[in-house]
Image (tube, coloured by chain):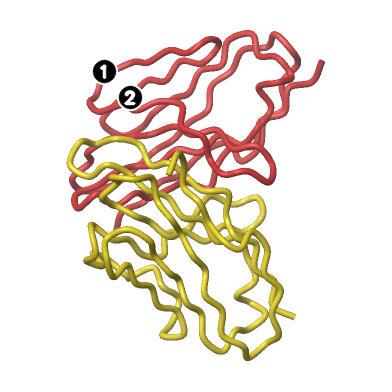
Chain colours: A yellow, B red
Amino acid sequence: GAGVSQSPRYKVTKRGQDVALRCDPISGHVSLYWYRQALGQGPEFLTYFNYEAQQDKSGLPNDRFSAERPEGSISTLTIQRTEQRDSAMYRCASSLAGSNTEAFFGQGTRLTVV
Amino acid sequence: EDQVTQSPEALRLQEGESSSLNCSYTVSGLRGLFWYRQDPGKGPEFLFTLYSAGEEKEKERLKATLTKKESFLHITAPKPEDSATYLCAVLVAGNQFYFGTGTSLTVIP
């Protein structure tokens, strides 16, 4: 696609429910990144992929968080048994790997756990 | 541990009052340093990439510079439309980006 697309834009869920956030990167982009951004803060790294391989998941807060990118394109960030502290803006970015290019961001998914 | 620190956290300038934002970093295997602008409710938008110490990039009223330990984003004669949060990010080995917490710039007419 023309840009990084994230869905849904807004998600309200009850505590304890599972949620899946989707990221469709720019076509041809090899690297895909997930970040969490609190109001007034910079993006906090969660995990990233090169193609379908998850390169680093050290930023995932705990084992309720997981991500996959099975075909090296679309990625899903899943949060199980959501808690109120999971409420945040979740941002996805993609970049061309190997050429030191910038990361392009999607509009984000605003998750609210009530 | 890789770290990116931005200062100041917030900056208020009068229109036309030039200033600089700082991004200091301690990382292993720096592959590039990136500046982004973020408007409220939107995703970060790319401004500049710097790859090596001594490099400079300019765009309108903005100029970014890089040393071995830090980068500066100089804003010359800012206008109210320059108000935004400015983020810096470092790209390290393995194509991983780390972001600073940003500087919130407000330019007063």
Residue bearing the label numbered 1: B54
Question: Are discs 1 and 2 located on one and the same chain?
Answer: yes
Subunit ID for the residue under disc 1? B
Q: Residue at x 61, y 36 (%)?
A: B85
Q: Is residue B58 left or right of residue B40?
A: left
Q: Is residue B97 above or below residue B46?
A: below
Mark 1 touching mark 2, by CB under 8 A?
yes
Quadrant of the snapshot with the N terminus of chain B: bottom left
**Front-most of residues B24 and B104:** B104
Residue A2, x across and y down, in percent: 45, 39
Q: Secondary structure at mark 2?
A: strand
The amino acid type of the residue labelled 1 equals Gly
Q: Amino acid at mark 2?
A: Leu
x and y, in percent, of residue A94 in the image: 37, 48
Compared with residue A16, is residue A22 higher up or lower down, i.e. above or below?
Answer: above
Q: Does residue A51 sit above or below B58 in this rendering?
A: below
**Viewer-closest of B37 and B13:** B37
Q: Is residue B22 above or below residue A40?
A: above
Q: Which residue is mark 2?
A: B66
For image coordinates 53% across by 40% down, the residue present is B44
Q: Chain of mark 2?
A: B
> Residue at image x 25%, y 28%?
B51
